Amino acid sequence: MTGPREPLDARPAPARDARPDEDAPPDLDSPPDGVEPDGSAELRYLRWLAETDPPLYTLARALCLAPHAAPAFVRRARLTFVPDSAAGLEADLWFSPLIESADARAMVLDPLIAAGLRHDLSRDRRQWKAVLSLTEDMQREAPELVRRYTRLALADAGERWVDTEAELAGFAAGISAGAPDGASADDLSRWLVHFLPRLPRVLEDAAPARTLLISAAARLAVDPPGWVVDRHGTARVAAARAAATRMPVRGRAELGVRLDDAGLTLSRPPAPGSRVLEVPDGERVRVELAGPGEATTQGHVVELGTDESVRVPVAVFAELAVKSTDRDPLTGRRLMNTETVFGATDASADGRLRAALRSAGEGTELLLWQGKLRRTVPLQGTPRLLRVDDRTGTVLLVAEDRLLVVRTEGAETVSIGGLGEIRDAVVATPDRLSPTRWVVVANEHGVCMVRPDAPMDPPTYLSRSAEVGLRIWVGAESSELVIVRGGVEPEFVDLAGGGAIRSEARADVLPVTAITSAHGGRPLLFAQTGPQLVLMPTPDTTHVVRGGGLSTDIVSVAISRGGAGTAAVDRAGRLLRWDGTTMSGRMREVPLPFPAVSISAASPWEFTVVGRGGPVELRAEDGRTVLLTPARNADPETGWLLDTLVATMPVRAADLESVVRSGIGCVCLPVPIRESTPGRPGSVAAGEILRAAGAAGIRMLVDVQVAPGSDAVRSGRGPRLLRYCAELLAAGAAGVRVLPSRPVSGGDTSTGRGDPTVEFLRALRRLVDEHPGRVLVLDRGAVGESAPRAGDECCHLVLAQGTRSVPQALALMETGQPFAGAVPDWTLSLSTGIGREPTRAGAMASVALALPGLRAVAGLPVGPPGDAVAALLRVRGRERALARGTATRLGSGDSDVVVLSRRYEDDIVVCVANLGTRRGTVALTTPSLPPGRLVDLLDLSGPQPTRTLGDRSPAMVTLAAHEYRWFRLLTSNELYASRS
């Protein structure tokens, strides 16, 4: 939901025959007449910027007449208008809050900022002419639509000589029904939907402009700004849309997206359990994939036809500072020089050399990066990466019994065959004075050396050790070969002389999982199962590291070239780091937005990390960008319950498809006790709906009515109830939801002794525990009270006693203070508890679903919720920060605007809602939130501006009446794909 963005300056510009004072300073002391409240924040910021940073203000003002500015344009403007400044001023502008969006090719000013700058520029005729002259000169070779936008921007600023209708007519011809190129018409429509709203005065005064915008939006099946529709009138809006229907309008198609630890899968129609997105329809739908925050506009293109599914593996390369306190000096990011590779089936790196394999037709292509070097090598078949060696610029691959050797500087791929099963290989230089490079290979026959420059020569065997799991290593600038086996001590071989090196070191008889060494070969470090790390400073001494956070086997280790730090990657994808090489200090886990696969030393100051999967930006053809984040690894056993919002609503088998789209992950299945009787048809129906729910990715809780005062528990029906529950658990039910009535009189309610309900719950809990991952839920508010100690002792989740209103929940949160969820769990009624006004219901639901302590939704009288609430439920199910962690209510300056910040570990979600009937603007300030980029979590109807929280300035969010927005805050560590 997006409200209108009104003009920052709605006052008529001064007459052009009246020449203002050319030397007067910017007049931003008071807002122009007619300025709406939502523009006042930008106006105050511009006033502050003009006083505190005149060079930055002047540079931005020089770009305000163009739709976007390329780097050459920005450089020319700086040299022309701020000649005494340094090149750093361009970077200050590029990353400032003045910019709505930027990539490697151009930057775009924020619409309200640009309007304010044009208003100021129009008062200084000398500067106006200079800026216009520069803009026209820089646009001399630009497309006509860019120059046309500039002329319309002049009209928007009050230049009367511009023929607005003629300029608009040129746009209209490009998207008319007779346009020769439908794809070009779609591109122009996207451009108009994005850029025309930046000219509010043109839209306000010119009916053809509004008709053009409404027609372009109808062509793309998106909604134009609401204030444009209101201004145009019902009859003219209908006429514009009717004209658009005569165009080849593209409808909408549903696309399913599912992320995992290694990439994502796109499906059309959506596969069960996928996130459902709407994209422009066609015989084949087309989307682009990019890393989060990636500057380039050229993403990885994926096309899908009907009934197709595409698997896209994702690999990530990044550099990580050796010391835990180090950050990129320019961006403050933990990860630097990042590359995201889509379609990579295998990836590896060593230092600055990075390699990835990607399918290409019937073969494979090898992608290589080393500094500025970019190279693609075609390969036959489906080889796998074995080793990457940065020092020699060599990549080793295995294809059946052949070793493939690829050099970054060579043109040919060397193939060495007849080596049998190849288990490991490493590049070696026995003679430091000779350019000859050897490859040491561990295969099923032993350890041998081969020469890539003489591939037909027979191998020279150094050892007959051939155990499975054997690892070999040759350190940089070393001629010492290390052979590590799980059953005996390490073996050292002098490659220059060919003899064995005596060693007195002793190691545990355990399989080896990873090996490395510092520059020069010492110290040697290898990992064993257990897990444990074995450090060998010399061939005769060992130091073993166990515990201290080591929980799963290590798969990759690295020692920085200067010895300042040690790092490791375990099988769970965690990145672990120690200061120094002795690993005697505390181990630190480095949070990464993707699972790590391997690590190597890039320099004395950086490690190179290889990862898989991670967040992905999906870009549709209509300009919309959606951030996709993989689901976090669920906690063992019943940990999924903490992230799941339980829907206490009856559901039928026919409702399952709608339930999936609504984002509901767990619902109840009311099955009477009589249906468990053998031979009854109801038992078959229950099994069918459980199987259907499992196929759809929905967890089902089965309702069990327990009346302590009745014969159901006190008499012989208690065992029958347990048998009934056992049957349903075995059939696939995710758990049991107990609906108790009032407690029976008598018995010790403080301990539960003698209470049939408590005894029954204990017996039921033992039954549930026999089915791993199944849960027991007690619903206190469904029928009546129950013994409180029984729920705390036996149940995984106890739902609250009745529902709570949103104002009641908000009242418990003090503004500015983190709230850790001390409020008892509560339930929200989506039918009556979110407000009586239908237009206000969505905003109230957005606040309620963002509040802490909410564990269940109820009061859904007829089927699943509407589209708006369903979108909220889908997002809440994906974001851990909305189910766990702390909540902070931020100050908004408006009693009708509610701002909530939810934080769990590195995940931050910001929820903003306007509960009032007037438009409101809120500034999200950095004292409460770290710097970063706000990404819309809700699927919106059109392209949205990029909002950036800077170190000094807030991001402004304007909301129409009853409008709400949910954002994911990507901090500098998560925007790992951004270019500096």
Image (cartoon, grey):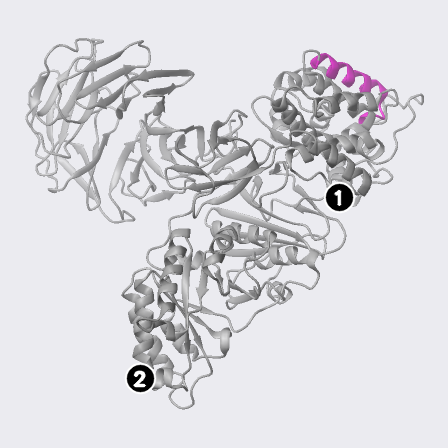
Which of the pair 956/729 is nearer the observer?
729
Compared with 915, 457 (above or below) is: above
The residue indicated by pointer 2 is 716
Q: Amino acid at mark 1?
A: Asp
Identify the element where label 1 is drawn: helix
Q: Is residue 973 left or right of residue 86?
A: left
> What secondary structure is the stretch in magenta mostly built from?
helix
**Magenta extent:** 121-139
The residue indicated by pointer 1 is 38
Specify whether residue 136 is painted magenta: yes
Which of the pair 421/304 is nearer the observer?
304
Q: Does the rendering let one see residue 110?
A: no
Q: CA distance from mark 1 to mark 2?
A: 69 Å
Q: Is residue 229 left or right of residue 462?
A: right
Pointer 1 or 2: first along the chain? 1
Q: Amino acid at mark 2?
A: Gly
Q: In the picture, residue 510 is in which quadrant?
A: top left
